[in-house]
Image (tube, coloured by chain):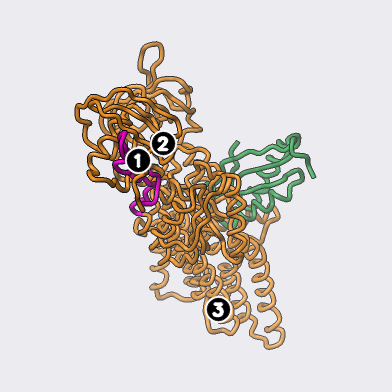
Amino acid sequence: MIPKEVIMKKVYRMENLCCANCARKIEEGIKKIPGVTDAKITFMTMKLTLEGEDSLFDGILAEAKKVARKVEPDCEILG
Amino acid sequence: MTRRQKRDLTRVLAAGALFAVALFLPLSGWMQGVCFALPYLVVGYPVLRKSVLSLLRGEWMNEAFLMTVASLGAFFLGEYAEGVAVMLFSAVGELFESYAVGKSRNSVTELMSLCPDRATVLREGEWVSLSPEEVGVGETVRVLSGEKIPLDGTVLKGRSSLDTRSLTGESLPRDVEEGDAVFSGCVNLSGVLELRVEKPFEESTASRILALVEDATSHRTKTETFVASFARWYTPLVIALALLVGTVPPLIFGEWSVWIYRALEFLVVSCPCALVISVPLTYFGAIGGASRRGILVKGSDRLDALAKVRSLVFDKTGTLTKGVFEVVSAEGENPKEILLIAALCEQYSNHPIALSLRNAWGEDLPNRTVSDLTERAGLGVSASVDGVTYFVGNEAWMRRQGLTPYPTDAVGTRVFVGNEQTCLGVITLADRVKENAADAIASLRRLGIRRMTVLSGDRKESVERVAEALELDGFSAELLPEHKVEEFRALASASSEEIVAFVGDGMNDAPVLAAAPLGIAMGGIGSDAAIEAADVVLMRDDLSALPVALSLARKARGIVLQNLVFAIGVKILVLVLCTLGFADMWYAVFADVGVSVLAILNAMRTLSKKN
């Protein structure tokens, strides 16, 4: 368990995400990234809520972008 | 339509035309193949590109790749038309899906255009136009007639009526004057208002509602979790079945092309998109539709809970009753005179009962000489009216003057009026039941709410009277605020199989709202505690929104279940028919795209303006 103090939570906008099933797959993929405590993609608002260890956050975000592009080649996570 | 949608539409239309031509050209063999390849490439290009790209990244179990395999497979088997159809119709389906999602997203953000983008603020003696984010608490903003109020504030100068429809769904304008609190998102209908800003932009009412509604679909329901795990297993399962169908039977019976064709049909049906999209789309539409009616639902899961509610517990004061004392009866030789004397003697008092007495008299008080006014806290007042001494107050006050209280059967708070000789009469005040409460309760009964009870801190007789008047199933009275939570828990556990919701106004029942499995707050506009603690907020102080909220929630839940059964049912049916050879690829295309479109159309019903 990662202690609460070092967890960071951020919301990102997503672009070119055009299928709900892909959103689900990306979400599940992001959840498996080490250091991620929770991830949620709300397809209706095209938002990704990412929660993970603060010190690893940059790496997590880069990895999340990779996961997204693997499932949906044009998909972008902004920010 | 977005640019992307327009581009896709052009693609679909062009491919459709080419496809029609190819269908009618009397060609055969490879010439025919070339003719069909044209529309195939036009409409299928994005899918082909995507499947190659994701294949390069090591991802092959996606819709694009499976579509590519299915359609190319059909081509190689010489079923050109089917090959094109798979691509063409899936493009149509996707276009439709993106249009539908965009439309419902817009209908929610349109409602949320209640946040104005400019505020006119006083800076160094001049009015300047700024973005509301830049305005700080304590600054003065000006709102002209026809403009939206940019930030929550208090009226410093001016009077006007406000259109609160976008916040509360209420069409009657609300009058405001100096000192009144106003909320962002309301439209100033008449005069010019100057406001003192009380809350920064992000914490103002309109912004908070926007955030809540936008965020609502991120709280997932059990159904969504089920759909997600279904989707996780469905695609691999169907692919495995396709492999099985494409290899095992032909090894036994031969006829490779027949069985491979059937396997390709499986691939066409392998995308669970219809299901995955229709559930959040339904909830999003319903939550958006509800907020347009002044009903704020804080999550899809709460909407689902609302649909399942079979039992309600109400708070009394401010929820079922107005929370203001009103005169129910005036008794005595001359009731009108009794009321007048009471109003005259109480004319300078700030006590809520004094206020109600003056309101009950209604007209201006006649010019009589009132002198020697004395007030005794907890008892009443005495005063001399045109030289006669009167006593106005409770029973104890009468007994103190040696008077026998006037006899009465009326239930409520009693105010006696007497002179030095005798008690002349009695006025009874009570907290009145809201006008539309009975109708709302009746509607709730018709919606199948089995048990409705009331909780209150008030005296037993008063609570009982309200419970009887509204034909409720029970009541608990004389509860201290801290005991309300315990009492609610006891009531809720007594009916264990159902979800019990609590309906309150958030004034002193915020703990119960928070503790209840489903807390419904009334008249939430401006009440932070209520919005914070509740799961559902009725922005308008009006019980009739409750049955509306309930039917909306049930409608949404119904649609979700229909789509679930329909989509899974059709897919399984088509898979069986394909295996047995009763269905060609057109059926598979229908099971994929047709079902998706129908499920989306069904989900879009939540956006309809009618209830």
Q: What predominant SS class does the magenta segment belong to?
A: strand
The span shown in magenta is B410-436
Residue B287 x/y as whole percent: 47, 52
Please state which of the two labelled residues, at mark 1 or mark 3, is closer to the viewer: 1
Q: Earlier in the sequence, mark 3 or mark 2?
A: 2
In the figure, is residue B184 to the left or right of B202? left
Report the Cα–Cα distance between label 1 and label 3. 78 Å
Q: Is residue B129 above or below residue B88?
A: above
Query: The chain shown in orange is which?
Result: B
Report the Cα–Cα distance between label 1 and label 2. 9 Å
Label pair 1/2, CB-CB below 8 angstroms: yes
Which quadrant holds residue B403?
A: top left
Q: Earlier in the sequence, mark 1 or mark 3?
A: 1
For disc 1, the marked residue is B416
Shade of chain A as shown in the rendered figure: green
For disc 3, the marked residue is B573
At 25% from the left and 36% from the top, the residue drawn is B340
At 44% from the left and 27% from the top, the residue drawn is B132
Report the Cα–Cα distance between label 3 and label 2. 82 Å
Circle 2: residue type: Trp
At 36% from the left and 29% from the top, the residue drawn is B349
For disc 2, the marked residue is B397
Report in which chain the residue with disc 3 lies.
B
Mark 2 nearby-residue class (10 Å; few <14, some 14–19, many ≥20): many
Secondary structure of the residue carrying tag 1 is: strand
Q: Is residue B276 above or below residue A58?
A: below
